[in-house]
Image (cartoon, rainbow, N blue to C red):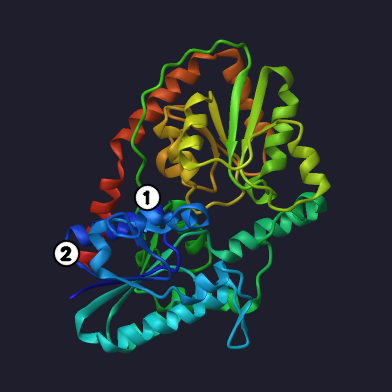
């Protein structure tokens, strides 16, 4: 008996879950589209354009438990537009892949006691599991969509130019119906932050059904705090879109003038003259590799995370692991990992004045950057990914 896990693409937290389950011999199978392993004979040949596939590298420990359904994704990667009269889109690939997982589940009913799913057409897998008395665990990785839509509606009414940079503002109604169906089938809803949990409770979901298991921190890197310039060096990492609260961050930085310098890392959400003009006023590094991002975090004095809504926000934990304190909004993991004024700062969303207040205090008391940064590093050291793995596997073993 074991746990069947499904995720179409995988990411850092999915890999941690898989390591946890495989290390405790409770992973039945992992189902995804494309997966590669460093111990495979072909791995060294993934160069040039194929190097992108290495982003789907998984721990070698799960290679024997992994079931791949790569056809549609590979065809899309090669530029094929249609298959069997259907447009090859990420949504269609999710749909097709879940049907294949359902067929697998149907053939292995007696071997599986739990399915662990993520948003995106998972309801068909969970429905099949429920029909066969198999426990359904669902990890909601974002705030509840009705809460997010409410925030974005307000942004749309405030400033249309900024609102136009929110690319995911509206989705087809069937997507929202699918999210609700997935939540309905779940026996247990796992959230990485108390923020996600709160949005569910606010919309009528039972707290007893929800379990918060925050993600882990990356390996820490000690920092020497020496500021050679009077100005405070700020760093923003993430999508350059209003959903991340960009306008409020820019307003705060502009108000402080020469006392601060801002560097931006990330991709433009839309290629508009409006957004390009805004970004061009600051140091813009574009997209960087993960290691390069960590290096920039290590060099910065403070990282800004002004998001309007992020289910967790890995930027926060990554920066803290580098000994760099973060100013983050309440609509993220901030309330789970930051003690305001101790190892970072928590501000309301859509509030440039709150950001200004924190930064003004740092301008007047620059020694706080080192003091708070050291506490951030201590927090990161106390919760490595192994702790997340221990907690999530314990939850699943107790079902």
Element carrying mark 1: loop
Residue 111 percent location from the top left of the image:
20, 81
Q: Quadrant of residue 38?
A: bottom left
Q: Nearer the viewer, residue 229 or 96?
A: 96
Residue 202 percent location from the top left of the image:
52, 62
Q: Which residue occupies 43% across, 33% down?
A: 320
Image-based side of 31 in relation to 397, left or right: right
Q: Nearer the viewer, residue 75 or 215?
A: 75
Residue 170 percent location from the top left of the image:
68, 67
Q: Quadrant of residue 307?
A: top right
Asked if residue 309 is positioned above or below residue 376 in the image, the reply reads: below
Residue linked to disc 1: 214
Mark yes or no: residue 212 visible. no
Q: Residues within 10 Å of mark 1 (few under 14, many from 20)?
A: many
Mark yes or no: residue 45 visible. yes
Q: Which residue occupies 52% across, 30% down?
A: 296
Image-based side of 46 in relation to 310, left or right: left
N-terminal label among 2 and 1? 2
Numbered disc in front, either 2 or 1? 2
Element carrying mark 2: loop
Residue 198 percent location from the top left of the image:
48, 57
| Cα–Cα span, label 2 and label 1 | 22 Å
Q: Residues within 10 Å of mark 2 (few under 14, many from 20)?
A: few
Residue linked to disc 2: 25
Q: Quadrant of residue 352?
A: top right
Q: Which residue occupies 31% across, 40% down?
A: 383
């Amino acid at each position: 008996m074991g746990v069947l896990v499904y995720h179409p693409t995988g990411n850092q937290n999915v890999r941690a879950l898989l390591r946890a389950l495989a290390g405790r011999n409770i992973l039945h199978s992992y189902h995804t589209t494309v997966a590669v392993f460093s111990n495979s004979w072909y791995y060294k040949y993934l160069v040039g354009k194929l190097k992108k596939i290495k982003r789907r590298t998984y721990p070698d420990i799960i290679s024997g438990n992994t079931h791949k359904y790569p056809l549609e994704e590979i065809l899309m990667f090669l530029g094929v537009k249609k298959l069997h009269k259907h447009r090859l889109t990420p949504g269609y690939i999710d749909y097709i892949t879940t049907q294949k997982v359902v067929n697998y589940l149907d053939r292995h009913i007696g071997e599986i006691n739990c399915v662990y799913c993520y948003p995106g057409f998972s309801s068909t897998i969970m429905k099949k599991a429920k029909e066969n008395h198999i426990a359904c665990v669902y990890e909601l990785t974002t705030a509840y969509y009705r809460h997010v839509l409410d925030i974005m509606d307000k942004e749309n009414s405030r400033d249309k130019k900024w609102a136009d940079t929110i690319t995911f503002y509206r989705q087809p109604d069937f997507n929202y119906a699918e999210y609700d169906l997935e939540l309905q089938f779940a026996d247990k809803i796992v959230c990485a932050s108390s923020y996600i949990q709160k949005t569910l409770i606010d919309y009528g979901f039972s707290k007893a059904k929800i379990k918060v298991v925050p993600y882990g921190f990356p390996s820490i890197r000690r920092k020497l705090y020496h500021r050679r310039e009077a100005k405070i060096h700020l760093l923003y990492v993430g999508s350059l879109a209003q959903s991340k609260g960009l306008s409020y961050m820019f307003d705060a930085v502009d108000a402080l003038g020469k006392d601060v310098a801002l560097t931006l890392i990330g991709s433009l959400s839309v290629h508009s003259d409006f957004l390009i003009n805004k970004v061009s006023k600051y140091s813009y590094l574009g997209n960087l590799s993960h290691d390069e991002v960590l290096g920039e975090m290590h060099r910065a004095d403070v990282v800004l995370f002004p998001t309007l809504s992020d289910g967790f926000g890995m930027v926060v934990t990554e920066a803290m692991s580098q000994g760099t304190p973060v100013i983050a909004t309440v609509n993220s993991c901030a309330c789970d990992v930051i003690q305001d004024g101790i190892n970072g700062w928590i501000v309301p969303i859509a509030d440039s004045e709150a950001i200004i207040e924190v930064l003004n205090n740092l301008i007047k008391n620059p020694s706080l950057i080192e003091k708070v940064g050291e506490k951030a590093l201590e927090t990161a050291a106390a919760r490595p990914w192994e702790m997340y793995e221990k907690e999530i596997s314990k939850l699943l073993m107790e079902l």
